[in-house]
Image (spheres, helix red, strand yellow):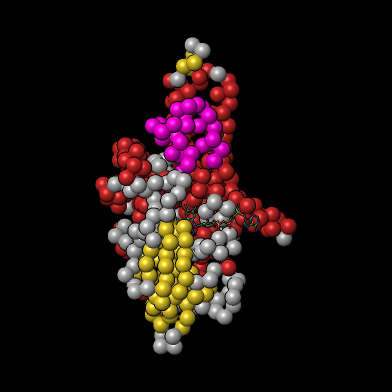
Amino acid sequence: MIRDASALNDLLERTRRFVREVAIPNEDRTEREDKVPDEAVAAMRALGAFGWSIPEAYGGSGLTTEELALAFLELSQASVAYRVVGATNAGIGSECLIRDGTDDQKARYLPRLASGELLGCLALTESEAGSDATALKTRAVHTGDGRYVLNGTKRYITLAPIAGLFTVFARTGEEARGAAGVTAFLVERGTPGLTTSGSTPKMGQEGAPIGEVYLNDCIVPASSILGGVPGQGFRTVMKALNKQRVNLSALSTGPAIRMLDEAVAYAREREQFGQPIGEFQLVQAMLAECKVAIEAARALILETARKRDRGEDVTMDVSICKYFSTEACGQVADKVVQIFGGQGYVKGRGIERFYRDVRAFRIYEGTSQIHLLNIGRRLVAGAP
Ligand SMILES: Cc1cc2nc3c(=O)[nH]c(=O)nc-3n(C[C@H](O)[C@H](O)[C@H](O)COP(=O)(O)OP(=O)(O)OC[C@H]3O[C@@H](n4cnc5c(N)ncnc54)[C@H](O)[C@@H]3O)c2cc1C
């Protein structure tokens, strides 16, 4: 749903300008320094990106799912680190709080998340709990005096080394596993007993750190339970991921659009056998396959976003969307490296960086296999 086309067009144009004038010129530096430059962070704050999805009442832009997808399709045409740092707050950094937080919790954190003063992260994954997130072992024990003691270790948490607010999932019930008895806690950096690792070395996405979160006798008041009611954590995170999977689909398609733009320009400029390689039909076929994948993903994302904005159940749609868009992006990355030949494999053009960066899309927020399982299970259960 688009509420005000002219305001949205203005936002999209300002985002394009940020990508063109600030983000792209700083991509090599971001990779080299493994840090998004402060001036780029400041520009994303001025753009309002941190609060795009946060309600206007709390200082955000309150974009609808469709508007947010359109904005993410633009922002993600720069290398992945920018949107991770600049827009995680408009996704998993705030979504649990928006869905199920109490009024007090929203008033306390959302304005600072919307401005980018505070970075949020979502700490679910553990060494034994990846795809099977319900196997998490982190425990929160009620002390009997209105407080909880948290113990456990989270890993691969986006922005953990630099985040200020952690949505931590811990087991408060007696069950040893399963979704029941899992509670979400809002824990601020500086709370005694919460520490984080440095940046975990990884294949790509330099500038977008992931890390571990250590909870060692971390004592928090019961008022830090997200929504105030224990045992609701899994329901909350599933609601948040339902939205986030549309976001991630858009964030996976922006890089594909950028890679194809670069490939078309290169195919026009690079000559072999006395003519531009773009004149060869086998190269045209690779370009065309990329274009088809991108336009199919875009249509699917926007249709799913509109469906969600209409209040329809999109549980299966978001799996289809996430699976298709992230797989499509991986195929585009592979073909674009091929079109660039050796220039696609060596450093310098940024193509190998995209190839590495986008590989994670098929792993996080539900692996491709988990989404296929979800779609298949629902079909067998009678979903249309
Ligand atoms: C860059 C990055 C950022 C991340 N950010 C966050 C974050 O911010 N917060 C957070 O909580 N987590 C985060 N994660 C963790 C991510 O969500 C997990 O890595 C993901 O859920 C997969 O879990 P796993 O790595 O343990 O793999 P596993 O679950 O061990 O999967 C290994 C393989 O087995 C397959 N598999 C597993 N179960 C089945 C099954 N039932 N049927 C068929 N195949 C199966 C998988 O598809 C995969 O191919 C991040 C990960 C990365 C790489």
Residue at 35% of width from left, 47% of height from top? 34
Q: Is residue 334 above or below residue 154?
A: above
Residue at 54% of width from left, 45% of height from top? 326
Q: Is residue 287 left or right of residue 205?
A: right
Q: Position of residue 207 (x, y in %)?
A: 37, 48
Q: Position of residue 321 (x, y in %)?
A: 57, 49
Is 372 included in the stretch rendered in magenta?
A: no
Decide if residue 128 is in sight here. Answer: yes
Can you tell which quarter of the image residue 62 is in? bottom left
Q: How many marks?
A: 0
Q: Which residues are magenta?
A: 330-357
Q: Main secondary structure of the magenta part?
A: helix
Decide if residue 232 is in sight here. Answer: no
Which quarter of the figure is the C terminus placed in? bottom right
Can you tell which quarter of the image residue 31 is in? top left
Judged from the image, the quadrant occupied by ligand 1 is: bottom right
Q: Position of residue 303 (x, y in %)?
A: 55, 48
Please name whichever residue, 68 or 167, is drawn nearer the observer in this view of the structure: 167
Q: Position of residue 288 (x, y in %)?
A: 56, 29
Q: Is residue 126 left or right of residue 58?
A: right
Residue at 46% of width from left, 16% of height from top? 271
